[in-house]
Amino acid sequence: MSEKVAECRRVVVKIGSSLVVDSATGSVKASWLSSLVDDIADLRAGGADVIVVSSGAIALGRGVLGLPGGALKLEESQAAAAVGQIALARAWSEFLGLRGLTAAQVLLTLGDTEERRRYLNARSTIQTLIGKGAVPVINENDTVATSEIRYGDNDRLAARVATMASADLLILLSDVDGLYTAPPALDPEATLIPVVEAITPEIEAMAGAAGSELSRGGMRTKVEAGRIATEAGTAMVIASGRREHPIGAIDATGKATWFRALDNPAAARKTWIAGRLETRGALTIDDGAARALMSGKSLLPAGVVAVEGLFDRGDAVRILDRSGRELGRGLIAYDSGDAVRIAGKNSRAIEGILGYRGRTAMVHRDDLALQAGARPVGRRSSVC
Ligand code: GLU
């Protein structure tokens, strides 16, 4: 596999708070940011489109407001982000501007990626900005995000942005240089994994939880980001940002963890369903139904053995096999009350039970996105 950032045509770069903000002074690390922007300008000069997802608003704003170190209350981080986002956007605009590049601030909320219409709207804004040669600089709109309705970490946000923009590659720059077989701080034998072919339960177990002082996302959210990205056909690389010219360093040193993208990603709409973070419930299905889904069929009420959660028609639900393994996600055709009443029943009985003629399928196959482990897939042999 040739793993070269320089070969990619559209790249999303996610930058963690601890890289861009000096924890001692609470201000932007100017010389580091300047070196990163050199790398971005190099990618652009090579013909690639670049989208930035930058954290750092809360870290920049907290000191200004005199907020204490450690975890903040939700309203404190909302206030800190309101102050810090101005400084963050100014820094990006200034440094990109010095290389003749135009920065465009885009602040997204979870709803902007979870609701189909808003997702398409955000996508077209980003496409327009790229088409005009600007560099979108994206962050979560932390000031209005509530605890239930937020990403909270920019790893998964960046993965959603990467799939939304049909990027070839998502680069996660943080204070770790990749995925290790065990937490390196605890285990001296731990080794860096250079390529993750597929996100297996073993890989998930290795991810553990490695957070740092300033950032919320640990390795777990990075592997989750990897799943969102790779299933949509976007490769991902985790690399250290604790050096100058961190993007150039990936190709120069080769020290990073690459996640291979699927060769046959699901269609765009299914990608959006698969990457949805908010699910309202879960359906456990029997083995016959699981086999039917894997051969491309819809999920009928007859195959559903348990219904969990409170949801409305059209909400996303997780679909589990009898052992609790997630097979995929889908948009359900019934609300939870009706789903419970028709679970296990033949579709012909629906009208008699509910008093109206509902859909034959509980989850139609067009509304169903199976995980890579539950459908035949191939992996790309090269990154871009
Ligand atoms: N959106 C947060 C900020 O800008 C960062 C979230 C994260 O650490 O991933 O401060």
Image: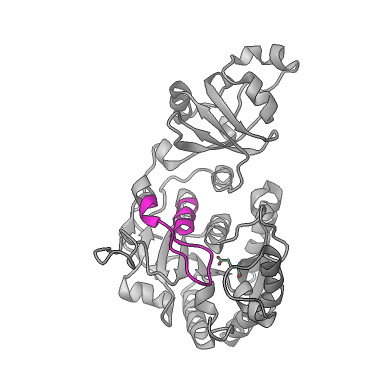
**What residue is drawn where x is 66% and y is 73%?**
104
Residue at 68% x, 55% y is: 112
Q: Residue furthest right?
A: 355
Q: Horizontal and vertical percent for residue 178?
A: 37, 65
Taking 21 as reference, is 128 above or below it?
above
Left or right relative to 202: residue 93: right
Q: In the picture, residue 92 is in which quadrant?
A: bottom right
Number of numbered discs visible in the structure rendering: 0
Can residue 211 be found in the magenta stretch?
yes
Q: Is residue 133 visible?
A: no
Q: Quadrant of ligand 1?
A: bottom right
Q: Seen in the image, is 4 located left or right of residue 274? A: left
Q: Which residues are magenta?
A: 204-228
Residue at point 36% right, 49% down?
Answer: 198
Q: Quadrant of the C terminus?
A: bottom left
On the question of residue 174 being in view, the answer is yes
Residue 125, position as x, y percentages in the image: 68, 62
